[in-house]
Amino acid sequence: MRRHVLLTFVLAGFTVIAASACDTTRDDVGGAADTAGDRARDAGDATRDAARGAGDAIERGAESVGGTASAATTTASIKSALLADQSIAGMSIDVDTVADTRTVTLTGTVETEAQKMAAERIAREHAEGYTIVNNIKVQQ
């Protein structure tokens, strides 16, 4: 019987030691999990910020490309209309469009003041929202 009592005390002691070790391990694991969670949250925040930055850069690039495409479309539209108008010597008029400043510049030479004004009118009709600079010269 003494052996059973002694064995019970020894087993109880081991149980207490094991239990206290488990509590320590549980605390260590809990702390490690908290640290890992904090790091994961920080990484998520950094990823979100990087994604926003990339999105902003893409948007700026798209605006730049869109502006260039818009300027080319505006130039083509004006030039086509100038060539289609039989009263204007459309081949002698250059059209330059700058998207950043939203400016269309007409240069070249025409025979009459009426042709110069007609070219400017056509440019205004096809470049809504743009400033038109008419540098066309009238032959004398």
Image (spheres, rainbow, N blue to C red):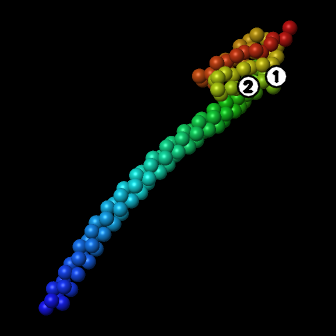
Q: Secondary structure at mark 1?
A: helix
Place residue 84 in its image quadrant: top right
Front of the two marks 1 and 2: 2
Q: Residue at x 81, y 19 (%)?
A: 108
Q: Are marks 1 and 2 in contact (CB under 8 Å)?
A: no
| The N terminus: image quadrant | bottom left
| Residue at the outermost top position | 140
Residue 125 visible in the displayed image? no
Name the mark on residue 100.
none
Q: Secondary structure at mark 2?
A: strand
Question: Nearest the camera: 48 or 70?
Answer: 48
| Residue at the outermost right position | 140
Q: Amino acid at mark 2?
A: Asp
Place residue 17 in its image quadrant: bottom left
- Please state if 86 lies on the left or on the right of 37 as rendered: right
- Please state if 96 lies on the left or on the right of 111 as rendered: left
Label 1 environment density (alpha carbons within 10 Å; few <14, some 14–19, many ≥20) = few
Provide residue 110's location: percent of width, then percent of height: 81, 16
Question: Nearest the camera: 68 or 133?
Answer: 68
Residue 40, placed above or below residue 79: below
Residue wearing tag 2: 96
Residue wearing tag 1: 92
Q: Amino acid at mark 1?
A: Ser
Provide residue 62's location: percent of width, then percent of height: 60, 39
- Please state if 56 lies on the left or on the right of 37 as rendered: right
| The C terminus: image quadrant | top right
Label 1 to label 2: alpha-carbon separation: 13 Å
Provide residue 31's location: percent of width, then percent of height: 36, 58
Q: Residue at x 76, y 10 (%)?
A: 113
